[in-house]
Each structure stands twice: as C-alpha cells, then as structure tokens.
Image (cartoon, rainbow, N blue to C red):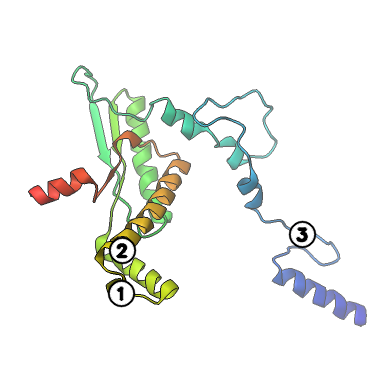
Amino acid sequence: AAAAEEKGAAKKKATANGVKGSADENVVEEDPGREAREYVNPTPKGELKSMDAPMQRAYQPHEVEASWNDWWEASGYYKGNSSPDDKRPKFSICLPPPNVTGSLHIGHALTVAVQDLLSRWHRMRGFNVLWIPGTDHAGIATQVVVEKKLAKEHKLSRHDIGREEFLKKVFEYKDQFHARITTQLRRLGCSLDWSREVFTMDEMRAASVNAA
C-alpha cells in the first residue's frame, strides 16, 4: 500500500511538473522549444545556405528554415523595380500595418500568408511585384498602453513627467515592438520589400497628413 501511495504521489508530481509518462518509466519530456532557441545557425547572415550536409531523418524546422529568408532578402528577390524601362506587368500590394502595441498573432499570420502567396505567385508568373511593409502608430491605443505601463512600473502619469518625456517613452515602446514585429515577419518568410518600409508617423507620412 505504501509503495502504491508513493508511486501515485510521484505520478502526480510528474504531471504537475509537465512530465509525460508514468513515474516508473522515468520519462522526462524536455522543453520542446529549447533546441530551437539554442540552435546556432552556421551560415553567415545573407549568404546562401550550404546543402552539403546529409538530410536529417526528422524535420527540424529551426535548422531547415534558417538562413533562407536572409539570403532571399540580401539577393534582392523581394524588391520591386520602379524603372519605367521595366515593361513587365505590375502587381502591388500593401501590408495592412500592424499596430506597434504588441506582437503579431495568428490573425496577422493568416493575412500575411495569403499576401505572401499572391506576391510569390505573381513573381513566378513574371510580374514586377511590390509588397510594401509598414507599421501603424495606433496613437490612442499606444498612449493607453504606455500610460498603464508608466503607472504600474513608476506610479506616475503622463502629466507627472510632461509631454516631451512622455513622447520619448512612447517612441521607446514603439521601437521595442516595431523590432519584434519586423523580426516576426521575417521569421515567417514574408517576401516584403524592406527598402520601402514605412511608419505612419515617419517624416514623409506626417508631411502628407499636414499638407492634407
């Protein structure tokens, strides 16, 4: 009876710790994402990946997908051609700019998957393709998020620190999540023309709004 109780307790403990299998099997499932996070890509950024290594028996996405997007981007495959001498039929599409209030989610992934499919398909058909990336400042939403963050971390309001300091905090937040968003888009393999990336509050867009 004591042995059965001990085995039951061990099984409960194993389940609570995220371990699959019975206690006597002593099977411990490792963090499934650890291998991918610790993977060191041997290919220098932007260079063509070597295909000399033998193919692994199991699909390892972090190894298989590494380097390809960097090489495609560095090779200029994603760039649209603005030259009037380029007589190819044109296909242009704009990425609905994600808000810089957080990370991309499954809805964004679905949208960009469809847009990427259309862009790549038109390239394969010989079109001059331009897919324009960008992010949205999401003014009120971003302000609310930063105000909550300021109150939680420093017990301060935007009125306490003043307009200029608050704007500085907002743009620090924007830079942090902008970098995360563009990294996610690149990890997804989105064939965007990054040389034309825009932000809804950058100098050119702001000038357009003021002129209007």
Specify few, some or many for label 3: CA neighbours under 10 Å numbering under 14, 14-19, or 20 or more.
some
Q: Which residue is mark 2?
A: 165
Q: Which residue is mark 3?
A: 28
Of the residues shown, which amino acid type is indicated by label 2? Answer: Glu
Left or right of 44? Residue 148 is left
Of the residues shown, which amino acid type is indicated by label 3? Answer: Val
Residue found 37% across the figure and 56% down from its top: 172
Mark 1 touches mark 3? (CB < 8 Å)? no
Q: Position of residue 210 (x, y in %)?
A: 11, 51
Is residue 14 in sight in this rendering?
A: yes
Q: Quadrant of residue 12?
A: bottom right
Of the residues shown, which amino acid type is indicated by label 1? Answer: Asp
Q: Position of residue 11 (x, y in %)?
A: 79, 72
Left or right of 116? Residue 93 is left
Q: Which residue is mark 1?
A: 160
Mark 1 and mark 2 lie on one chain; the one further toward the N terminus is 1
Residue found 20% across the figure and 16% down from its top: 85
Residue furthest to the left in view is 212
Mark 1 touches mark 2? (CB < 8 Å)? no
Is residue 193 in sight in this rendering?
A: no
Mark 1 and mark 3 lie on one chain; the one further toward the N terminus is 3
Q: Quadrant of residue 25?
A: bottom right
Q: Position of residue 46 (x, y in %)?
A: 49, 29
Indicate the secondary structure of the residue bearing disc 1. Answer: helix
Indicate the secondary structure of the residue bearing disc 2. Answer: helix
Specify few, some or many for label 2: CA neighbours under 10 Å numbering under 14, 14-19, or 20 or more.
few
Q: Is residue 118 placed above or below 38 in the rendered structure?
A: above
Real-space Cα separation, disc 1 to disc 3, in angstroms: 51 Å
Locate the N terminus by quadrant. Answer: bottom right
Indicate the secondary structure of the residue bearing disc 3. Answer: loop
Q: Is residue 167 placed above or below 88 in the rendered structure?
A: below
Residue found 76% across the figure and 73% down from its top: 13
